[in-house]
């Protein structure tokens, strides 16, 4: 495999829970990300899927150095991103870009689309000479399928999907090496979603970009990702190639996730064998002991409460799976 | 109080004739008067929903799905947005001509909405618990303590873990998916007859999505609630919709029962849309897309608005606007070649 461009080791982010009006006391921690390790190779797409609230966006922010980790390391091209000089910080900011989950709040409502997409050029003036910027911005708008004539409009004049494309255009402005995409297509209709995915694909081939692609839509992730990581309550529970995860999943949570994927075929309503998870999603402030999935797992045994299963290759799982009883199972697969 | 009257009024037409649909949008026109010109965003939308039924609204991003919903809710951004024609009848009464006070009562308990952008729909400076409790205090005359109690129940209902402690959190402290569930809880608070859900599960992973869709289906059954589901997720639509309306450039271009629509789409836009889905056999290949740009609503293409991008377009398509015609009495399509598409094997 190609060189590792981004290395994450035992990354932890806990948010303090505070109480009290005048004297704020910390009464607990939300364990948003709790010991995640991963490698991103040059030119590859790593998909990340998982339950809502399991820490995907927090992980994305940690990778971007937008949040300080409680502990652990993020290394970019072998260098610890927390120990970079200001000049190196700037380079990092340029080379890793984020496309955010929420197209509504991530765009400044008082800036025109031209200003938003061109903002990276203000911060990194050497990327495009001043006289050239307007044309570059229009090019970027065209690339993401927006009308270049709309350069002077404001975000609220665009639909949700159109706004998401503005975010993508801005992320592309500086020709970064890594793009962290947090739900980049979930607000888009499938035809524009297909355009954006084709676009990401094409940019990847052209510039050897690496993507971390966070999405809820498992069929979208399957289409675009080379490898996939599945997260549950702040932890990575299964990692593998797209076939490992989609054809040979061995972690019960992954299996439940895949079984719940809605199939775009109304005649499949009866045929589907969805694994309905029992119980509530536990609070990340107070995750279950041992395996965090055990409160909802139909295979849980005593050991699951006492021993935390490690993310590792097992006799019954050819790829890393964090389950004491990892095993393949027939599930209805995502299209 | 008068809100009780709204709830128990029989379904009646404006002229006193009974029958008609629970919620009926007819020939709605909305435009945005912007600095650049007049954007014709809704150009004659008609759809309806009955009690206990789910209508899914599909369509291109920017085609006017949310604006239609905002107009139904009476929260259209005016100016620049203006309703220039049509009617929206709820239990036979036109919401567009109704007095402000009466309309306010319809909002929340007659028709409630889950918004696409959960974060901006919640007030960032108040805790989630306060916002829900206020709703009960203002609309139901409950004490603050009772309001908080109901708020806890609601967050439990939408499966937010440790609901009681999370009531004290502000919206930004919730993950995207949890904010969405908070929104759903608030929309259900006043027991609405029609729920408009604008992308209610886009921010949710599939297991929670399945739970929420189950929950909505259960509530819809128990309360005989009508539901308008706006979504891009063709999988969810296949799972839960009874009927589907497909929008393009502010018009309904196709309307059909869910099985008919997936089984045999009869409008080229719907065909192309279904064709763009990622499929297993297309891994590593380019996905099908619809060529060209979405229409510029300041200058909607002549004739059929889809013609610059349509693979089937002929001369007539740029000259004449196709009407939404019935096919076999059960479905409708706005294409000059609708009959041909309907007749194909
Ligand atoms: N600034 C913050 N303060 C306190 N808690 C936070 C903060 N940001 C996130 N959290 C909590 O951390 C957990 C993980 O949140 P995160 O946004 O990373 O989830 P996610 O996996 O992206 O979810 P979704 O799929 O719903 O977007 C959640 O419980 C969330 O409430
Ligand atoms: N306040 C506004 N001012 C000007 N134009 C607006 C305004 N709000 C919406 N529009 C325009 O109206 C059109 C329809 O928007 P709408 O939000 O209804 O789209 P949508 O079908 O919901 O799309 P999506 O699937 O992306 O959410 C878009 O072209 C949008 O740019
Ligand atoms: S370790 Fe135990 S509880 Fe966890 S997923 Fe495996 S069987 Fe289930
Ligand atoms: S009327 Fe013509 S352009 Fe419009 S959808 Fe039908 S074939 Fe295509
Ligand atoms: Mg997130
Ligand atoms: Mg919308």
Image (tube, rainbow, N blue to C red):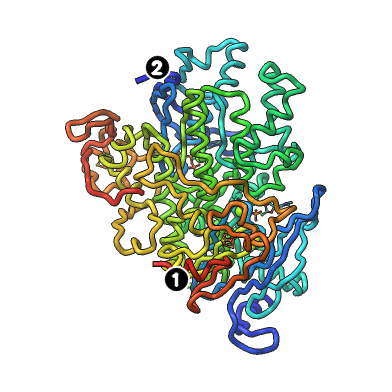
Task: Measure the C-alpha gap from mark 2 to mark 1.
Answer: 56 Å
Label 2, secondary structure: give it: loop
The residue indicated by pointer 1 is B343
Of the two numbered discs 2 and 1 in the rendering, the one whose residue sits closer to the viewer = 1
Mark 1 beta carbon near ligand 4 (under 8 Å): no
Image location of residue A36, percent across then percent down:
40, 28
Q: As displayed, is residue A207 above or below residue A224?
A: above
Q: Relative to residue A194, is residue B248 drawn left or right?
A: right
Residue A334 appears left or right of B62: left
Dot 1 alpha-carbon crowd within 10 angstroms: few under 14, some 14 to 19, many 20 or more: few
Query: Which residue lies under the disc numbered 2?
Result: A3
Q: Quadrant of residue A316?
A: top left
Q: What's the chain of the residue with tag 1?
A: B
User: Residue at the bottom extreme?
Assistant: B17
**Image position of A91 with respect to A157: above or below:** above
Residue B213 locus on image (x, y percent): 44, 59
Residue B325 relative to residue B35: left or right: left
Q: Say if residue A71 shows up in the picture.
A: yes
């Amino acid at each position: 495999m190609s060189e590792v461009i981004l290395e994450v080791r035992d990354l932890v982010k806990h948010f303090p829970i505070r109480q009290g009006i005048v004297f704020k006391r910390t009464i607990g921690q939300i364990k948003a990300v709790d010991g995640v390790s991963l490698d991103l190779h040059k030119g590859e797409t790593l998909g990340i899927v998982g339950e809502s609230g399991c820490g995907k966006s927090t992980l994305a922010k940690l990778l971007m150095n937008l949040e300080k980790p409680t502990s652990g390391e993020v290394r970019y091209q072998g260098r610890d991103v927390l120990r970079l000089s200001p000049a190196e910080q700037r380079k990092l900011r340029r080379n890793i870009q984020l496309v955010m989950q929420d197209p509504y709040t991530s765009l400044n409502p008082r800036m025109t689309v031209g200003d938003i997409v061109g903002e990276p050029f203000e911060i990194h003036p050497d990327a495009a000479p001043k006289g050239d910027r307007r044309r570059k911005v229009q090019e970027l708008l065209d690339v993401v399928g927006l009308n270049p004539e709309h350069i002077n409009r404001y975000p609220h004049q665009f639909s949700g999907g159109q706004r998401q494309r503005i975010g993508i255009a801005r992320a592309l402005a500086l020709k970064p090496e890594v793009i962290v995409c947090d739900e980049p297509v979930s607000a888009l209709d499938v035809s524009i979603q297909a355009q954006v995915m084709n676009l990401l694909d094409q940019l990847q081939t052209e510039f050897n970009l690496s993507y971390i692609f966070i999405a809820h839509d498992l069929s979208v992730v399957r289409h675009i990702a080379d490898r996939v990581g599945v997260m549950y309550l702040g932890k990575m529970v299964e990692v593998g190639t797209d076939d490992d995860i989609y054809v040979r999943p061995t972690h019960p949570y992954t299996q439940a996730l895949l079984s719940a994927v809605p199939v775009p075929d109304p005649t499949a309503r009866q045929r589907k064998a969805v694994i309905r998870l029992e119980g509530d999603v536990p609070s990340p402030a107070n995750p279950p002991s041992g395996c965090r999935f055990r409160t909802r797992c139909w295979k849980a045994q005593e050991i699951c409460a006492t021993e935390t299963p490690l993310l590792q290759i097992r006799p019954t799982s050819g790829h890393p799976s964090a389950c004491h009883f990892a095993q393949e199972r027939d599930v209805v697969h995502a299209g | 109080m008068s809100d009780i009257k709204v709830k128990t009024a029989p379904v009646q037409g404006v002229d006193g004739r009974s029958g008609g649909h629970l919620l009926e949008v007819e020939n709605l026109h909305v435009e945005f008067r912007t600095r650049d010109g007049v954007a014709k965003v809704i150009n004659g939308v008609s759809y309806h929903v009955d009690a206990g039924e789910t209508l899914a609204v599909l369509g291109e991003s920017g085609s006017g799905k949310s604006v239609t919903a905002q107009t139904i809710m009476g929260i259209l951004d005016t100016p620049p947005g203006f309703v220039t024609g049509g009617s929206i009848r709820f239990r036979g009464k036109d919401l567009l001509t109704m007095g402000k006070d009466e309309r306010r009562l319809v909002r929340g308990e007659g028709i409630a909405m889950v918004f696409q952008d959960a974060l901006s729909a919640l007030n960032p400076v108040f805790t989630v618990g306060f916002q829900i409790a206020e709703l009960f205090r203002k609309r139901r005359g409950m004490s603050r303590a009772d309001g908080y109690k109901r708020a806890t129940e609601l967050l439990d209902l939408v499966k937010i873990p440790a609901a009681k402690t999370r009531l004290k959190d502000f919206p930004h402290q919730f993950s995207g998916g949890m904010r969405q569930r908070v929104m759903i809880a608030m929309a259900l608070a006043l027991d609405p007859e029609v729920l408009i859900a604008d992308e209610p599960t886009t921010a949710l992973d599939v297991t929670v999505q399945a739970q929420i869709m189950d929950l909505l289906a259960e509530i819809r059954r128990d309360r005989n609630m009508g539901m308008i589901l706006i979504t891009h997720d063709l999988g969810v639509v296949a799972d839960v919709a009874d009927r589907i309306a497909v929008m393009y450039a502010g018009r309904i271009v196709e309307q059909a029962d869910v099985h008919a629509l997936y089984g045999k789409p009869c409008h080229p836009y719907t065909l192309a849309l279904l064709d763009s889905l990622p499929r297993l056999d297309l891994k590593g290949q380019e996905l099908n897309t619809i060529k060209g740009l979405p229409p510029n609503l300041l200058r909607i293409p002549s004739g059929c608005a889809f013609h610059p991008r349509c693979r089937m377009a002929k001369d007539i398509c740029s000259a004449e606007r196709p009407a939404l015609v019935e096919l076999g009495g059960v479905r409708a399509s706005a294409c000059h070649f609708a009959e041909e598409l309907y007749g194909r094997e």
